[in-house]
Image (cartoon, grey):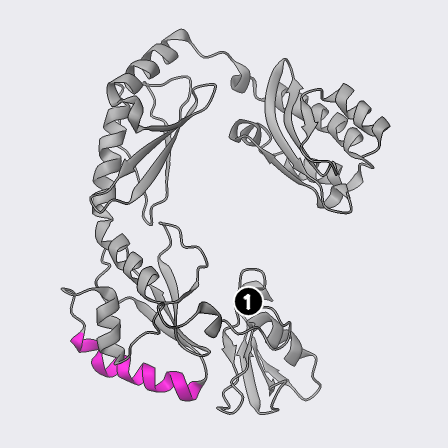
Amino acid sequence: MALAGSRALLRQCPLLLPQNREGSVYEGFVTAQDRDFHIRILLPSDFQLKNARIQCSWRLKKLLHGYHQIVKQRLQHCSDLVSFMVEFKTILEAALKNAPELHAPLPPEYYSYLVRDIETLGWNKIAYVDTGLNTIKLKGEDSCGRQHLITLKLNAKYPAEPPDCFVDFPVEFAISWIPQSSLIDIYNQFLAALESMKEFWNAMDEIDEKTWVLEPENPIRSATMRRIAIGNNVSINLEVDPRHPTMLPECYFLGADQVVNPLRTKLNNNMHLWDPEITLLQNLKEVLEIDFPSRAVLEKSDFTMDCGICYAYRLDGAVPDQICGDSRCGQPFHQACLFEWLQGLPSSRQSFNVIFGECPYCNKPISVKMSMKKL
């Protein structure tokens, strides 16, 4: 940003400062109605505002709920950051007028109750408290030593009304609350919920530690799906029931028919051998009569072949899961890439949302089904 532009921005937002020499990252506070709101603006390399990203505190995000489209339009039409911030402050002023409860001062009893509760619970259980004492993160450990967080969003009527609770769980977490309840009651319910999820997390951790998980790339605690590599361009997709993690999960195979059809047959024939008393991973090995590729011997790159059309592995979060059925080819493709490719071939034919054509590599017959949400 030019020097004149930097000075103009400083006059408009004296608390919003550049974080690098290029002037592509700004962080600080924007002021409206004598209140400061934390904001971070990331500009792309070409400094085009329309491609900028805005990160803000949860309070500002909540305040601007319903104004996202207006902010997006201003990014599209403003010529520079200074003019955008002028309009952004106008939007912020309007949002504050329409949400007076957000800037009403909290009653003194709120703070006295909250500080009392924190001291009773113990400051060693606190992972984070924001400056306004509205957001609190509590840390807990399950009996297997895994660390977990619960985020509490409190309102001015605490403790008469319970805080909103956010956890990284695969099931809903609902607290029991009466006006006499406190943070320690929430914390004890949180710990009890952690123990109820122990078997599920044990099963998922064993899969993550002993197999090559292709998806999700970085599993979170609430993730119930795993796509596990079986071999080159062959994998199994599992959907595990968090309430019954040792039971047979939903399974489907991804890969060429000549490879996955024998695996489907083994699963159907050996399903009766599934033993809920042993681990999920051990059951899969015995029912499918396979050993999953070892993390100690092979690298993840051995199973992550790029799409044969776009030459990338990940495309909008998806990985290549369509495989040419010819054993001499076996080229993987993204579902969207293959569908688009086949649509462009005059020799292809389509039946509803399935299209039939030829493999781009070996010209053997290939088909792909596109889910309606992607069409």
Q: Position of residue 224 (x, y in %)?
A: 35, 57
Residue 139, quarter of the rendered image: top left
Q: Residue furthest left?
A: 277
Q: Is residue 180 depicted above or below 359 in this figure?
A: above
Q: Is residue 9 above or below residue 21?
A: above
Q: Quadrant of residue 277?
A: bottom left
Residue that label 1 marks: 372
Does the magenta segment cover residue 265?
A: yes
Q: Is residue 176 visible?
A: no
The part of the chain drawn in magenta is 257-273
Kind of residue indicated by mark 1: Met
Q: Quadrant of the N terminus?
A: top right
Could you tell me residue 117's position as x and y percent?
29, 18
Note whether 327 is above or below 353 in the view shown: below
Look at the image and say whether residue 56 sits in the magenta stretch.
no
Identify the residue at horizontal 42%, vertical 9% (top origin): 107
Q: Main secondary structure of the magenta part?
A: helix
Name the residue nearer the viewer: 290 or 288.
290
Kindly identify the residue that appears in the image at 80 percent across and 36 percent down.
78
Image spot of residue 206 (x, y percent) = 28, 60
Q: Is 91 or 255 nearer to us in this picture?
A: 255
The answer to whether residue 372 is seen in the rendering is yes
Q: Say if 320 sits above or below 134 in the image.
A: below
Snapshot quadrant of residue 199: bottom left
Q: Quadrant of the C terminus?
A: bottom right
Left or right of residue 240, residue 106 in this image:
right
